[in-house]
Image: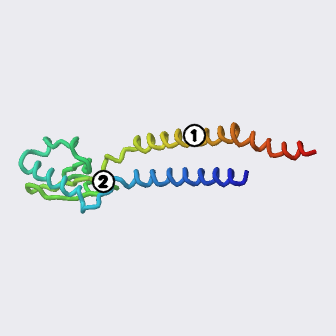
Amino acid sequence: MRAWRKIFAAVIVIMAVIFSLSNWILCNLHTPENGRPYRVEVNRLSLQIEQEDFENVDLSQCEYVYNIAEYGENFYDTASDYIIREINGRLYRFDYTARSNANNPNIIIMVNVILAVMTAAVFGVLFYVRSQILRPFERLTNVPYELSK
């Protein structure tokens, strides 16, 4: 029975480690390691504004830049990270996030739900083995003593 408790405790620790590692990996999966990829988007958008017009810029394809503001009132009033560029004599603020939007919270939730279901299945198997296999043997341990009487 002591060995069973050790195995059960080990399974709990292993599942906690799996949960922790998977969440850590998912949260740090899309951090840029090779420089600053948002600068590439800012440069591309700057060229697009320079060649075309500010109103024709489409941010739907951008992964890091999520807003462009032309110089005006409250130009510097923002809590986000930004880069300012002068294009055709006008100032533009490019708001960006250093992390990719590909780090979707729905993926993290889905992975945690799948891990929870797997954990429940593992514990179900462990309880089944204990109740159907180990308990009958536990009951049989006193039988030889009773028979010898």
Viewer-closest of 16 and 50: 16
Viewer-closest of 85 and 61: 61
Tell which residue pokes out farthest to the front in this image.
148
Q: Position of residue 29 (x, y in %)?
A: 35, 53
Q: Position of residue 82 (x, y in %)?
A: 26, 57
Residue type indicated by callout 1: Ala
Q: Is residue 33 above or below residue 106?
A: below
Residue 24 in view of the camera: yes
Q: Is residue 84 above or below residue 132?
A: below
Residue type indicated by callout 2: Thr
The residue indicated by pointer 2 is: 97
Viewer-closest of 129 and 8: 129
Q: Is residue 31 above or below residue 131?
A: below
Marker disc for residue 120: 1
The quarter of the rendered structure image containing the C terminus is top right
From the viewer's perspective, is 90 left or right of 27?
A: left
Q: Position of residue 69 (x, y in %)?
A: 22, 50
Viewer-closest of 98 and 91: 98
- Name which quarter of the figure residue 88 lies in: bottom left
